[in-house]
Amino acid sequence: MRENRKYRPRSTAKSKSVGSDPRYLEIANNLRQELLKGKFGTGQRFYSIRKLIQETGRSLPTVRSAVNILVDEGFLQARPGSGFYVTNKVEEIRSRGQLNILTVMPSYTAPTEPWFTGKIFTGMINVAEKNRAVVSFYQRKNSFRSDPENAKIDLERILSTRPSGIAWLHAIDSDVPLLKELIAHDIPVVATMRKLKELNLPLIQENNLVFASMVLSQFQARGHRSLAMILRNPQDDYFSDKISTLTQTAKSFGIRLEEKNFYVIKTEAGAIQKTIGKAGTKWSAYKIDAVDLERFLKQRKEITGIINLASEGLYPILLLMESPFKDYFKRTSLLHNILDGVAIPTLPTGESLATIAPPLEALGEQLVNYLCAVVQGKTPELHQSMIPVFSSGTSMKMAPSD
């Protein structure tokens, strides 16, 4: 999301420069293998950025992003004005042997982004060393649709890294054929967030009952009794589990959360069309949803709170907050579920957005712990009851009195 003065993403981490060319992950993996094969000794000066640009034929941002990953992992030390130097961590790992935990992610995210994948990456790095493991990354090409050619490229590149185990982030149904191929090669795979059809992969996720209780208790404490929910795909495993748990638990909180009050986003994931003009950033792909959502809410005057489960649901809400319908949100509580790493802005109303998110660093730690245990022949612990993280915000208001 591009920023202007109205929308200011909140972040707890600062992202390094990341090239637009996804090859930076491949370059990082190749350089890591060179280090672990002993091409450089401890304290030795590593390749210069200029030399890597010449050898790879890639741009400065791409090469710098690759090297920054190795710095983050502790293999290189950056010395301003001098270059990059190999740390003793490389020799320590080489002397004791290491496991290669490959993190496979979609093309639309990166290990250095600060919102979602970046936090999982931090958790993985935190526990990799004590597990005698190295965490490497691959951005899959086959992210949003089933494409046999891209899937073939993904398979070849993933196998070329010789992974000991694979952590598969943001899994979707079109990933199933590729995952079947990897499983056939006897590579342990663990997934996050959602179950996949035809596969019984180990799954690490947050506790849905705790998630529902956290969400509903916030609305209950402020006197809300009737809620709406914004969704992307009710049939998706991630959303269906959340919906089922929320609707079943709502009754015990004295809250009405019914299917007739569910709004399903029509815009397909990834279809954001940005038009920059004098009025600021507009998301033209979501204008239809904004009009429909306004009509939907006008027909439900009893609604005083909205649970936004879909990251895309934030865009039509932001559009409505800059329209004549903005007064509606002066009396309505809004709580946003962070799923796909969307940067959370300060709202046009000046309020901060209340959010709930998976415990991302802990999730990353569990991915590494689980895979290393499997590879080492130990009995792995599968933590499926991790506690979500709630961040308060002024978008949660007291319900209007009757």
Image (spheres, rainbow, N blue to C red):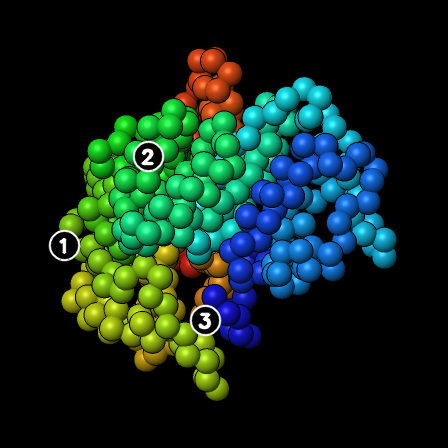
Q: Nearer the viewer, residue 271 or 401?
A: 271
x, y percentage for residue 24?
A: 57, 53
Q: Residue furthest bottom?
A: 278
Q: Is any part of residue 171 visible from this angle?
A: yes
**Up-down: is 253 above or below 260?**
above
Q: Nearer the viewer, residue 363 or 55?
A: 55
Task: Report the residue at 51% width, 51% height from top.
Answer: 110
Q: In this rendering, would 362 be left or right of 274?
A: right
Q: Are marks 3 and 2 in contact (CB under 8 Å)?
A: no
Q: The disc labelled 1 sits on which kind of residue?
A: Lys
Identify the image quadrant of residue 304: bottom left
Q: Nearer the viewer, residue 392 or 37?
A: 37
Give the residue at mark 1: 260
x, y percentage for residue 128?
A: 60, 29
Q: Are marks 1 and 2 in contact (CB under 8 Å)?
A: no
Give the residue at mark 2: 181
For marks 3 and 1 on the same chain, the one whose residue lies earlier in the sequence: 1
x, y percentage for residue 119?
A: 54, 44
Q: Viewer-nearest of labels 1 and 2?
A: 2
Q: The disc labelled 3 sits on which kind of residue?
A: Pro
**Up-down: is 168 above or below 312?**
above
**Up-down: is 15 above or below 42?**
below
Q: CA distance from mark 3 to mark 1?
A: 28 Å
- Residues packed near mark 1 inside 10 Å, few (<14), some (14 to 19) or many (20 plus): few
